[in-house]
Amino acid sequence: MRARSLNSSVVTWPDAQTVEHALREWAQALAQRHPDVLRVGYIGSYARGDWGVGSDVDVLLIVAQADLPFAQRAAAWDATGLPVPADLLVYTLDEWRHLPSDSRFAQVVERQLPNPQRIGLVLPDFVASVEPPT
């Protein structure tokens, strides 16, 4: 997407297809390095299609377990290779399954992802669905 400023500079920003492609590659590499990553997906403006110059991508990571408190987990994951800034939300599978369905966050996720509470087997709109190695 291009936008002109008052002094005619051109600002470019990655489109949704570019961001999704980069996110898929990032998710696959992440899953190969970290077998505890169960699911990777995104919500927000890129998922809705109303992104613009300056938009970030809101990435959901579902992991088998986590030693850090929720507020500190995002810092443990490197998303600097993505073409836009990323806001990482890292949940354990148990936390994800027990999200209060009446919370605002759960309602947003429900609108943007099909069957978000049924993550156990299939969540097709997630970027990567990685089964633990056997």
Image (cartoon, helix red, strand yellow):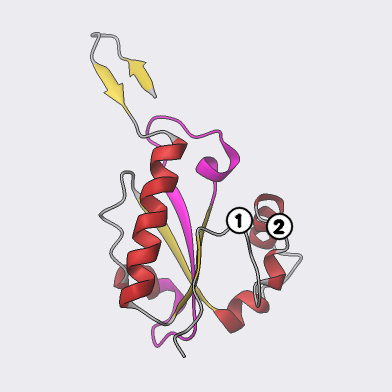
Q: Which residues are magenta?
A: 43-71
Q: Nearer the viewer, residue 129 or 118?
A: 129
Location of the N terminus by quadrant is top left
Q: Which mark is residue 48?
A: none
Q: Residue 70 colored magenta?
A: yes
Q: Nearer the viewer, residue 85 or 124?
A: 124
Q: Across the whole image, how many numbered discs are drawn on residues?
A: 2
Q: Is residue 105 left or right of residue 17?
A: right
> Would you place residue 27 above or below residue 112 in this image?
below
Mark 2: which amino acid?
Pro
Q: Residue 102 colored magenta?
A: no
Q: Nearer the viewer, residue 103 or 40?
A: 40
Q: Is residue 106 left or right of residue 10?
A: right
Mark 1: which amino acid?
Asp
Residue at 42%, 55% (x, y): give it.
24
User: What percent of the width, then of the height, locates residue 10?
Assistant: 26, 17
Residue at 34%, 59% (x, y): give it.
26
Q: CA distance from mark 2 to mark 1?
A: 7 Å
> Would you place residue 129 above or below residue 114 in this image?
below
Q: Residues within 10 Å of mark 2 (few under 14, many from 20)?
A: some
Q: In the current view of this chain or complex, which residue is farthest to the bottom?
A: 134
Quadrant for residue 113, please give it. bottom right
Tell me whether circle 2 and circle 1 mark residues in contact (CB < 8 Å).
yes
Q: Earlier in the sequence, mark 2 or mark 1?
A: 2
What residue did someone put label 2 on? 114
What residue did someone put label 1 on? 125
